[in-house]
Amino acid sequence: MKHQKICVLSLLLLFFSSIGLAGKQSLGVFLASESNPLDVEKALKKDKIFSQFDITVFAQYKDFELAVAKVPFDIAILPSIYFKTSKDKAYSPGLQFTRKGEMHFRYQVFSMDKDWDIKRLGEGSIGFVEEIDRQQAKVLVKDLLDGKEFKRIKPVPRSQDLYPMLALGNSNYIMISPWVWESVKRDLVAEPNKVVTTLEIPYPQLGYLTKKGELAKGLKDFLAIGKDALEALGFDGIKGLEGK
Amino acid sequence: MALKVSKENEGELMRYFLFIMLIVLFRQPLALASDILVFRSQEREFSVIYDLLKRDLGKYSIDEIVVNSDYNYDKMRAAILAERPKSLILLDNKALHLAKQLRKEADTYLAKMQGVAGMGLNLKKELKDDPQFCGVAYEVPGYTLLTHFRKIYKKPLENVLVLYRKSVFQQEIEDSRRQLSLEKIGLIAVDVEAMGSDEASLIAAIDKGLSDEVSGKKIDAVWVIGDNGLINSKTFGNLWLARARKFSIPFLCGLQQFANPKLNFCSYAASPRDAGIVNQMVQMTLSLLEDHADPGELGVDYLLGTDRVINLKKIQDLNLPVATQNDPELKTLE
């Protein structure tokens, strides 16, 4: 009788864990922005959609990767390139964040010295905020610049370190997202040279752990994310991806 | 009980024995080999840096050697030959100085050994035009210190005084002047060795140079370089501390200890952030190992990440207007 009870309980636990009802679901957030992770976490916890989630917000790609390697999050909010390029495709994108109705943005490439112009990209080094694995980042930068390559890439873990990299001469160019640039230029007197803008890339996305495919069904609930939570993440809208 | 082995099994057992011996023999060098060998000082802060390096270079095998006061070149040479790393990471000047001797070796592997240096003083000068070692400077750049302070300071920061020794910090001062001019911050740099580099001349030059007005220009702040040629037992109390108490302008530095309210010397400090310097060293190491970059071309990068503190007591003593909320990462020392 005792063994039967244990068997039944184990089966129930297995069933509930498979449909994601055993304990809270987890949400991992990594966005290459200047926002304080604790502030973002607080804002998300106040939102009714996320109130049932264990939420962790990461300031750096590396920290997110280390955490995921131990215990993957059920749901993740990540740069769109992560979903596209991560080796194991551990997460599948489901929803698209937007700004002013736009689903895409372009990075801007700046140099400090006018001699480092578009003709010299191949001779120079470029700094950018680390959002994906280093080797994949090389391919991504090339793709975003329509096949133009840099001599060297120099990823930085935090967006706060990106502009100083250019100002101090650690790199000849930087590739910066419009939202980080907005924040940087508030404190800036110098006027760096805008060298080129990249091809379009989707804004960050919300996705689910690929191996828990059943989570995809619940994604539509996230379309009701409140304004404050969206704002904390740096967006003003969210919509479904085509076919999701 | 004695184990009886038949003649038939004897040959088989011998083959097993030889097989195990081969595994043991080949396993030995593999167990010792490291892709990256880190030479570091024994102090705790270096151990913290090593742990972070190990975490961030996780896909490579990495080992550490502690460089004590009696550690010498022969020990370093033997360690490198035993582990045959692909690259070195040298934490502190002693490790770097020993590693530089490798180039005199006839063995090409040793002579061409390359690596990344960090947490050493004045690496910009130490590694100028070095073909085999690149690095990350440990001093907080004037640009970083002053532009971060300007974010929270509610008064103009147009003329900043810095005293320096040209023989040591010429390049940093030239770079800082250029970088800061783009931010419309004027650097008034006084070379205290201009009248001689003996102790008496230096003290006289610091006494004369450390002023809140230079050539008719009002000084808005003083950037204090952590150089023991400038700040030492002969000059600290009488000159630096006395002037910091006399002038009504902030003294800014790259050493957190100087902003301790008990000392009450500097109003603000930005010091190297461990995770930041580790990331820079990791990226350089990956450039060497994965991109086969030329260390001479990588050169020495300026430090990027800093931890920033404000000495609230000093700020209040001087009645300086600050908006600490403008830097969310700023820590207040009271």
Image (cartoon, coloured by chain):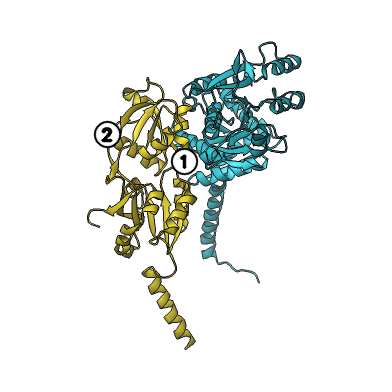
Chain colours: A yellow, B cyan
Q: Assess disc 1: are there few (<14), some (14-19) or many (≥20) residues with their C-alpha within 10 Å of its C-alpha.
A: some
Q: Which three-letter amino acid code belongs to the residue tagged 1?
A: Arg
- Residue occupying the far top of the picture: B195
Image position of B21 with respect to B84: above or below: below
Q: Position of residue B172 (x, y in %)?
A: 56, 22
**Residue closest to the eye, B270 or B18:** B270
Q: Which mark is residue B121?
A: none
Q: Position of residue B250 (x, y in %)?
A: 63, 29
Q: Secondary structure at mark 2?
A: loop
Tell me the quadrant of the picture where the C terminus of chain B can be found: top right
| Discs 1/2, front | 1
Q: Are the numbered discs 1 and 2 placed on the same chain, yes or no?
A: yes
Q: Position of residue B127 (x, y in %)?
A: 56, 24
Q: Chain of mark 1?
A: A
Image position of B328 with respect to A92: above or below: above
**Residue closest to the eye, B39 or B198:** B198
Image position of B242 with respect to A61: above or below: above
Q: Which three-letter amino acid code belongs to the residue tagged 2?
A: Asp
Q: Position of residue A177 (x, y in %)?
A: 36, 38
Q: Chain of mark 2?
A: A
The residue where tag 1 is placed is A158
The residue where tag 2 is placed is A146
**Residue closest to the eye, A225 or A74:** A225
Residue at 63% across, 17% down: B213
Residue at 49% across, 86% down: A2
**Does the image show residue A116?**
yes
Tell me the quadrant of the picture where the N terminus of chain B can be found: bottom right
- Residue occupying the far left of the picture: A243
Q: Earlier in the sequence, mark 1 or mark 2?
A: 2
Distance of label 1 from label 2 (alpha carbons): 26 Å
